[in-house]
Image (cartoon, helix red, strand yellow):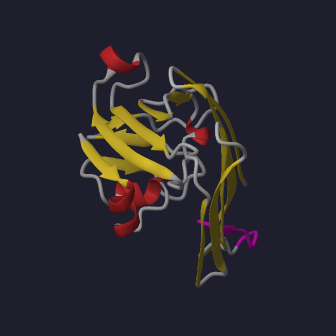
Amino acid sequence: ITAFSADALREGQINNISDLTNNVPGLTRQEGDKRANLSIRGIGTRLSQITADPGVGVYVDSIYMPRNDSQLVDVLNMESVQVLRGPQGTLFGKNTTGGALVFTTNRPVDEFEGSLGLRVGNYVRLDANFVLNAPITDKLWTRLSGVSVSRDGYIENRYDGEDYMDEDRQSLLWQTRWVPTDALTLDLQLNWAETD
């Protein structure tokens, strides 16, 4: 197991799956692809078809991300990230022959808090992220986080002028927690992501 706390993710500047592969021994992905195509210790899948099941399972708050294109998770608002080397079929079921990546997000809390991040760079890189936590009542809290990543490609196809290795993705995560009694906690989570 390789595990990262929120502080370790921030100190290691781990912002996405690609950054995670640079910090976890044996975890690789096919760079430049718009899909995750994850492998742990060489076990995974290289098929990029929508019908192909991945060999490494990705879970966000115990919710399985079933396809390679939905597994490109940005590491934002995370409490912890765990990389479990496989096989993990006993705990997680199928599609975990190579292992599993387990992302646990920060839940809404009863205090107002927020953060804003911005990163600029060459090839017109512009990344932005935010987290906003707001209590609505003393028993109902909400948390909204989002990220936008964009960068022009740095490989040009001279035949058709198309750029490769570009990035363009956005994601939003909205969470609401209601604690009507000490014995009951209800969580609602909506997750939206788009990768062009």
Residue lying at 28% horizontally and 29% vertically, measured from the top left? 86
Q: Position of residue 159 (x, y in %)?
A: 72, 71
Which residue is pictured at 43% across the width and 48% down the height?
79
In the foreground, 110 or 120: 110
Tally of numbered discs = 0
Q: In the figure, residue 131 lies in which quadrant? A: bottom right
- Where on the picture, by quarter, is residue 150? bottom right
Residue lying furthest right: 160
- Residue 62 x %, y %: 49, 28
Q: Residue at x 38, y 25 (%)?
A: 96
Residue sitting at 61 percent across and 39 percent down? 70
**16 up-or-down from 79: above or below:** below
Q: The C terminus is located in which quarter?
A: bottom right
Question: 132 left or right of 184?
Answer: right
Q: Is residue 178 left or right of residue 104?
A: right
Q: Is residue 1 above or below residue 7?
A: above
Outermost residue to the bottom: 122
As for residue 81 lying within the magenta part, the answer is no
Q: Confirm whether residue 103 shows in the render.
A: yes
Judged by its main secondary structure, the magenta piece is loop
Q: Nearer the viewer, residue 194 or 28?
A: 194
In this image, 174 relative to 72: left or right? right
Q: Is residue 60 above or below residue 154?
A: above
Magenta segment: does it hold 160?
A: yes
Query: What is the magenta range?
Result: 159-166
Q: Position of residue 6 (x, y in %)?
A: 39, 56
Which part of the image, by quadrant, shows the N terminus?
A: top left
What percent of the width, then of the height, locates residue 184?
A: 55, 21
